[in-house]
Image (tube, rainbow, N blue to C red):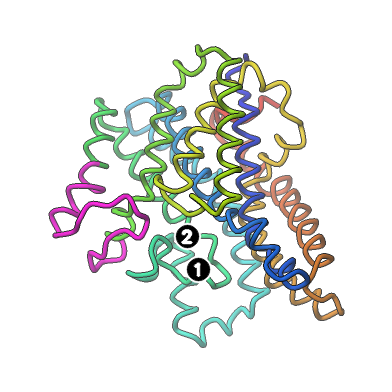
Amino acid sequence: MNPGVLRSVQALRGLAALSVMLFHFRFNLNATWPGLGDKLFIWGASGVDLFFLISGFVITLTIKKTPADFSGVLTFFKRRALRILPAYYVILLLTFFLSGAMSVFHYSDKTLNFISSLIFQPAYTNNAPFYIDDSGMYNIRWTLNYEIYFYLAIGVLALIPMRLFAFASYFILTLIVLPLACGQTFTLSPAGYDLGIKQLNLITNPIIFLFLAGMVLGYLYPLLLRANGRVMAVLLAVSLGMTIWFFSNGQYQGHGVLSSGWLYFLILAFAIGAEKTLGRYVPDVLVRLGDISFSLYLIHTLVNKTLRKRLEGVGMEPGLLMFIAAIVLALLFAWLSWRYIEKPFQAKRAGRSPLQKAS
């Protein structure tokens, strides 16, 4: 198996973005068939948990190959910046200009959320685990606050020769010791803690355990590669079936390791282990969906809110047609973003992601 091609994981990344998009687009179905969109896609927001798991996994594979010196860490930060920032800021500015531009600054809450979106900081001490206005135009970027923090923490800690010990010590300190020292009761719920400072609330939020679970899979990667591929494929099918059954019964649909997180952990672990058996059978369309997943995640709310108003302006009412049109537009714009923003900047990155195809 070519270790540079993890088709099953790339497909999972694409499906995670698709599930979040369908969650946000479900209201169009509700407009025609009340409750149908909720019944079909209310679980879709949990795709974020799968994103976090995959992020922890991929970053671990990357950091294991990064030299423990300033040059290596700077290269790590450069690659992460080129992976995320160009598409993020282009789509953020498009959203800004298509959503009223300077009128945003007439409202203090919108101004606060816009500024915080520019610097990847939480806006509020409450509304965990988002810590922003999750109903606003920039709502999806709450996950990037965690991503950027996670990258920064891992990159700095990578300067320490005993990396695994440094990683474990730091996250034990921030996720367990700090909340307990502040008089909080330990929890795994993403409702988190109220420590009075928004940045502290974010770095202590238990949703970060999803990244750490992904890191565990990153360190177990050599063992997973040696596992029996057929057995892992069977276990993958069982875990997928179990997840579908739980979701269809309204169980484990939320965020966190005790909700959808543990199900996605099993799916990701078994998918990695089954790669040598199933990888070549993963449809190319799902791999391509994984390629554009980041842009799809960023741009779909722009389509769902701003562009939807344009469609309504020409007579298209919320419903099945709007649902289909929104999906098509989101996929099209995501591909354009990937092709003309993400891909050129990724070509400038030093080295390649373990998930990136050698093309």
Percent x, y for residue 248?
Answer: 61, 50
Q: Amino acid at mark 2?
A: Trp
- Stretch of the chain drawn in magenta: 172-199
Is residue 52 inside the magenta stretch? no
Q: Secondary structure at mark 2?
A: helix
Vertical position of residue 141 compared to residue 149: above or below: below
Of the 4 image quadrants, the one containing the N terminus is top right
Q: Disc 1, disc 2: CB below 8 Å?
A: yes
Q: Which residue is mark 1?
A: 134
The reply to whether residue 240 is visible in this rendering is yes
Rendering quarter of residue 71: top left
Q: Amino acid at mark 1?
A: Asp
Of the image marks 1 and 2, the number of the one nearer the N terminus: 1
Of the 4 image quadrants, the one containing the C terminus is top right
* Residue for point 78% across, 59% down: 329
Relative horizontal placement of residue 176, taking residue 192 as reference (left or right) = left
Q: Secondary structure at mark 1?
A: loop
Kindly identify which numbered label has been placed on residue 142.
2
Kindly identify which numbered label has been placed on residue 254.
none
Percent x, y for residue 149?
Answer: 38, 50
Task: Report the front residue among 204 and 346.
Answer: 204
